[in-house]
Amino acid sequence: MRKSKLGLALAMMLVIGGLLGACGTDKGKEKDEGATGSSEVNENAVSVAMVTDTGGVDDKSFNQSAWKGIEEYGKKNGLEKGDGGYDYLQSNDASEYASNLNRLVRRDFDVVYGIGFLLKDAIETIAKENPDAMFGLVDEESDVENVASIMFKEQEGAFLAGAAAALMTKSDKIGFVGGMEIPVIERFHAGFVAGVAAVNPDIKVDVQYTGNFDKAEDGKAAANRMYTSGVDIIFHAAGGTGNGVFSEAKERKAANPDEYIWVIGVDSDQYDEGQVGDHNITLTSMLKRVDLSVMSVAELAEKDEFPGGEITRYGIAEGMIELADSRGAIPQDILDKIDELSKKIVDGEIEVPEDPKQ
Amino acid sequence: MSNRVINLLVPVISIILGLIVGAIVMIFSGYDPVTAYIALWNGIFGDAYAIGETIRQISPYILAGLAVAFAFRAGLFNIGVEGQLIVGWFAAAYVGSAFDLPKIIHLPFALIAAALAGALWGLVPGILKAALRVHEVIVTIMMNYIALHVVNALIKTVSGSYKTEKIHETASLRSEFLSNITDYSTLHYGILVALAMVGVMWFLLDKTKTGYELKSVGFNEHASQYAGMNVNRNIVLSMVISGAFAGLAGSMEALGTFGYLANLGGFTGIGFDGIAVALLGANTPLGVIFGASLFGSLKYGAGNMPNEAGVPTEIVSIIIALIIFFVASGYIIRVILNRVNKKKGAK
């Protein structure tokens, strides 16, 4: 009797192990597929690796975009995933930033990126200890000699998003859902409000910060409140929290297909997130081409022109910030007006503020 | 088998079982368990750097575990370690950056500030429990949220940015010596603070009248009351001391690992893991060291599995959870061993 119980317990353990294993299989395969497929080998190519922030590599926005850029650079140059090629490490906790960076440096990657402003301190510490290694820091400025800072003029893209929202709104009420109140997100906020005001100063922008990037339920609650109060277009700059904005809008659209509501996506093209039946509630997305910027820094390193100690600011003019294809959601005459504004920003006629308090 | 052998065997068998089941998971998902476990081992003990980082990771776990264990001995379930840790972290980071003092005053001052902040956060549920019999579990859970958002707001008001200023060198637990012997790891003197607190807890509980009373209240409140002890006073006291330990855990992060506090998007998890650490350690001071070492090493070493063996983070989390799961279910193994023992005895 006792023996059979023990046997049962062991059998259950095996079954559970098998189930868990099965769950994990798909992911592993996906990853392997990503690693295959290469073209000619470039002798000068540098090996590149990145450390994610706590959002993880599949956050559908920032980290994912950076990884896409690294993968693309690697494949273009015939590199393989792993040592001497390209790779990433995911941080589950802020205390892992420094050790993950260090692990990659020890594996002799030529350029190591820290994705996100949160990695600034870690990257500066490790960069000072390894003066011969090259580091890239996205979204934050550093003056350490072997750190290249990659900054974006998010305010420019947000300005265009704001103008688009102001031209499209019917209720003259527009919403902005931000993640944490940090300089990057404040640039989105400032640009968006300025873009709305440039079209119609009377429109009120309802601004709410949720204080996090990974709580979809908070984004959903914020969107619910805004749509209920008459807001018809919401721009989110909140990473995973923003997924809640999409689900709220989709639920409303599914319940009442005639309701006039839109979401403006961020970082990557979030068109797929907005599909609900035959409708799509994604008006457009403000693209931040982290992938291109990461590749461009790697290419500079390849040519021995690594911009260490420099701060590079990418905006509309550099093709790193733009609005995604609206797939017909925005009529042509409005798109023309947005193009006009975009040219004015490039020409310097319009200077978009970085700080919402200005 | 004597009891002593069983006591030793139980954790060993639990860990081995956890590793085996973890290996099965990896085989099914197409990863090589041997390379993965070598990577885990190297991640924990591989070189001086890894050892330094592992010890660094263990320090806050010891203190968080002590906090939970101490309250538990007095019959209270302190789920609020997380919140007490966060306010302690903030207090230490604030004192560390706002004042200019010689090291001999500054460092203890920052540590005491963290302990006091944590104690204050423990005082509220303590008083509510003692005076109004409000259940401490509810209050401490809610105090966690209050801590998280109040501290985030304070960071913004005090520093005007998303993180506090960096602490001055005079308040830092970091040392060049420790850094050098561990190949530039972030190891700091916090581990000594943590071990000292293990001693403090042992002394308090086992060598003082207060400790005797606290334990007595934990065993049976009514009997203690009848015996003339002031139950309410003991409840408040145990929550305050527990909070102080948790606050010190926060100071490890403020004065050692990070040197600042950045806006927190969510809980750190150390406080909640502290519950498991305390229970694994049977709520004894020495047991907490064992629990914290297991948690800290697995947590830090696991980071090397994606790095060296290419196992995805998600699978690593499952494996670590399995190991801890089996260690926590050590009771089952103990029962089995005892039965095997009895059978042999009967024959």
Image (spheres, coloured by chain):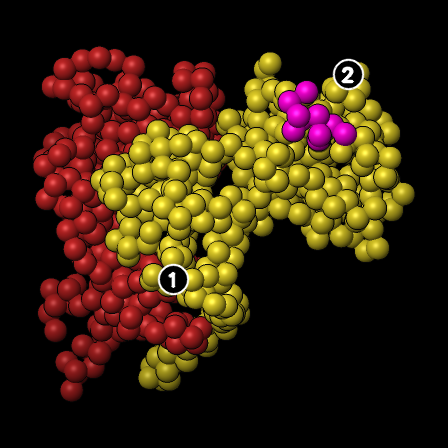
Chain colours: A yellow, B red
Give the dominant element type of the magenta stretch: helix, strand or loop. helix
Was residue B324 drawn as part of the magenta stretch in this picture? Answer: no
Is label 2 in a helix, a strand or a loop? loop
* Residue A255 placement (x, y as % from top left): 83, 47
Q: Nearer the viewer, residue B297 or A46?
A: A46
Total number of numbered labels? 2
Name above or below for residue A57 compared with residue A220.
below
Numbered disc 1: what chain? A
Q: CA distance from mark 1 to mark 2?
A: 55 Å
The disc at residue A201 is 2
Q: Nearer the viewer, residue A355 or B134?
A: A355
Give the magenta part as a residue range: A340-349
Amino acid, disc 2: Pro
* Residue A15 placement (x, y as % from top left): 46, 77
Circles 1 and 2 on the same subunit: yes
Report which quarter residue A6 is drawn in.
bottom left
Query: Which residue appears at 11% of the width and 64% of the height?
Result: B4
